[in-house]
Image (cartoon, rainbow, N blue to C red):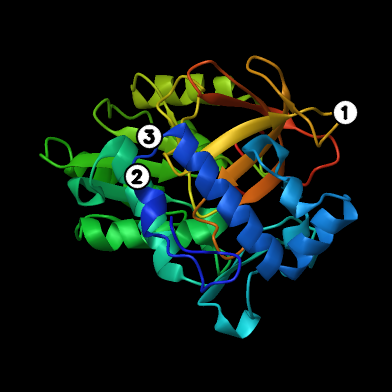
Amino acid sequence: MTTDMIDGPDPKHVDIFKTMSSGQFNDIALELFHYQYKKSAIYRKFVDYLGVAPDSIESLEKIPFLPIGFFRDQVVLCGKVEDTDIIFRSSGTTGTMPSHHYVKELSLYEESFTRGFRYFYGPPDDFYFLALLPSYLEHSHSSLIFMMDSFIRKSGKESGFYLHDYDSLVDTLNKLKGRKKKVILWGVSFALMELAENYKLHIPEVIVMETGGMKGRRKEITRDELHQALCARFDVQSIHSEYGMTELLSQSYSAGNGRFMTPPWMKVLIRDVNDPLSLIGTGKTGGINVIDLANIHSCAFIATQDLGKIHSDNSFEVLGRFDDSDVRGCSLLF
């Protein structure tokens, strides 16, 4: 990325999606930090409040991460609200304020999630997408629904959304058996459990992708318990998972071992729970910080309310939430 992001025009996003070395990632992240410090009023206030001098930030590890709660009651944006393409909102829970992500370039989000899916699974049009996402379909402005709608439109007439019509979903799953195109069943956790409890399916060739979200709908269970139950009822070897949220424009994926991998333009770091400005190494549990280079126009450096740890292969686990965090619509812990 050669654009001068401090004094020049808005940064171009084309470079963030190419394969890059760790050094190139760090350079882009530092440029993006200086751009967002200058262009985002709320991020600049946060950095100044910490007493951090922007010119002193010379490594990725020193960049301040914005607490994710700022997306609930502040406008996190480089630019003017009236110039945004869309505002994504989290589902929220009773008594809590939903997060708002002001997205200046909707095409950038679509490019990010399409490239991210392709990076891990291949072209989206090689799949049929069956989306079992009732809790998300019940509210507007969901980033997940936008993503799934894009995939569905690209993948053929057999793909589609399902609210509570499990009979039709089962009919479609049976109809698609033996097709050359692969099938992915993408569902919110409580709905997948309801499907599993009411139908015993033999769908070993289907990729089952859970995107979290018990949201108080059911008795809380661990992810391992959920995956074991779904594997048994669906006759699949593993359950895949997606780690995404309203405040990000990129997703991480797990192929079923509980470990998530990020696309090249995304990175997860772990912060000390007792010193949120300090990072800790591999194998230690702490707060999950996310760098999403696709978040050019909001904030690329987010301190989530999830707990996790990183492994030596750069995969990461999500182990829980901070006690005072909201129950999140896209969280993977129950």
Q: In the image, residue 135 lies at what x, y percent?
A: 57, 55
| Residue at (18% x, 44% y) in the render | 175
Observer-nearest residue: 157 or 218? 157
Write down the quadrant of residue 57 in the picture.
Answer: top right
**Between discs 3 and 2, the one toward the N terminus:** 2
Quarter of the picture containing the N terminus is: bottom left
**Which label sits in the foreground, 1 or 3?**
1
Q: In the image, residue 54 lies at what x, y percent?
A: 75, 53
**Which label sits in the foreground, 2 or 1?**
1
Disc 3: which residue:
208
| Residue at (28% x, 29% y) in the render | 203
Please rate how many residues cluster around mark 3, counting C-alpha atoms within 10 Å: few if below 14, some from 14 to 19, many from 20.
many
Disc 1: which residue:
274
State the CA–CA distance, disc 1 to disc 3.
Answer: 37 Å
Label 2 residue SS: helix
Amino acid bearing label 1: Asn
Observer-nearest residue: 287 or 33? 33
Q: Is residue 33 left or right of residue 127?
A: right
Amino acid bearing label 2: Phe
Observer-nearest residue: 3 or 160? 3
Disc 2: which residue:
117
Q: Say if 140 sits above or below 329 in the image.
A: below
Write down the quadrant of residue 178 in the picture.
Answer: top left
Please rate how many residues cluster around mark 1, counting C-alpha atoms within 10 Å: few if below 14, some from 14 to 19, many from 20.
few
Quarter of the picture containing the C terminus is: top right
Q: Is residue 10 left or right of residue 222?
A: left
